[in-house]
Each structure stands twice: as structure tokens, then as C-alpha cells.
Image (cartoon, grey):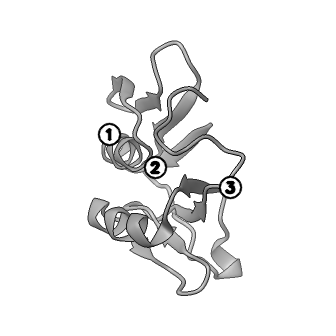
């Protein structure tokens, strides 16, 4: 997955902190976060003219959104906001990252390994 953005280093740092994985590759216009340098991850690509979505405005639709799995949404929300996200919706737990991409916090289902468990 590649996410277009205006500042790849800053957005990669935000998501690295948010989901707890390191930055494994960094150039001026391309940054990758992943569990290690041999696995797939999320890349952030420089797109100087990127226009973020204006959720829920249908004239500025989402190109994608990420569901971030957490053990406890009430605990995770203040941490997400402290990292620089902003809440877009009261009931649905929809947020914008520091560059405007939307993401949701979702509760970890019982079948999924606990958040932070590297065995999965």
C-alpha cells in the first residue's frame, strides 16, 4: 500500500508511532514503515499537490481509509489525538491523520492476536 502525501517523513512517523512499527526505508520522497526490512508495509510517497479528503463531503471523497485495530478505544483515542490526529466524528470513531487522510479506530476482535503481539 502506498499513501500519497505532502510530507512523507512526517506522515510515516505518525503511523509508525500509531501502529508500533519502525521506519525501515527513507528517502526524501519515499518512506516505508514495516515490521522489518524484509516484509511488506505501508509506503508514503511525496505528492506535493495532494488534496486530502473532506470527510464526509462527497465532493472530496476518501481515496482510502485505514482501520487501526486497538484493544481499548477509550485508551487509544487520547493517544491518537496526542500524536496529531483529529477526530472527525463523534459516534463512528473516524479521525484524520496530520495530513488529512481518514482512519478509524476499531476494537480488536477476540480471534485476533492482542495488539503488540508479534507472534501473529
3 or 2: tag closer to the N-terminus: 2
Of badges 3 and 2, the one in the foreground is 3
Q: Are marks 3 and 2 in contact (CB under 8 Å)?
A: no
* Category of crowding for the residue at label 1, using alpha-carbon neighbours closer than 10 angstroms: few (below 14), some (14–19), many (at least 20): many
Q: Secondary structure at mark 2?
A: strand
Residue 63 picture location, percent across and down: 66, 58
Quick one: quadrant of the N terminus?
A: top right
Query: 58 or 21: nearer the eye?
Result: 21
Residue 95 picture location, percent across and down: 49, 70
Q: Secondary structure at mark 3?
A: loop
Tell me the CA gap for discs 2 and 1.
Answer: 10 Å
Residue 9: mark: 1
Q: How many marks?
A: 3
Residue 120 picture location, percent across and down: 61, 29
Residue 5: mark: 2
Q: Give the residue number, with chain letter if any, for mark 3.
A: 109
Q: In the rendered view, would you say 93 is above or below 44?
A: below
Amino acid at each position: 500500500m502506498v499513501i500519497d502525501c505532502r510530507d512523507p517523513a512526517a506522515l510515516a512517523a505518525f503511523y509508525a508511532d500509531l501502529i508500533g512499527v519502525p521506519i525501515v526505508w527513507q528517502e526524501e520522497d519515499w518512506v516505508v514503515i514495516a515490521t522489518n526490512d524484509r516484509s511488506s508495509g505501508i509506503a508514503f510517497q511525496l505528492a506535493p499537490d495532494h488534496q486530502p479528503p473532506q470527510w464526509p463531503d462527497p465532493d472530496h471523497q476518501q481515496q482510502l481509509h485505514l482501520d487501526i485495530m486497538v484493544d481499548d478505544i477509550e485508551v487509544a483515542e487520547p493517544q491518537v489525538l496526542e500524536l496529531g490526529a483529529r477526530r472527525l466524528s463523534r459516534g463512528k470513531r473516524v479521525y484524520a491523520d496530520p495530513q488529512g487522510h481518514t482512519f478509524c479506530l476499531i476494537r480488536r476482535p477476540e480471534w485476533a492476536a492482542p495488539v503488540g503481539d508479534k507472534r501473529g
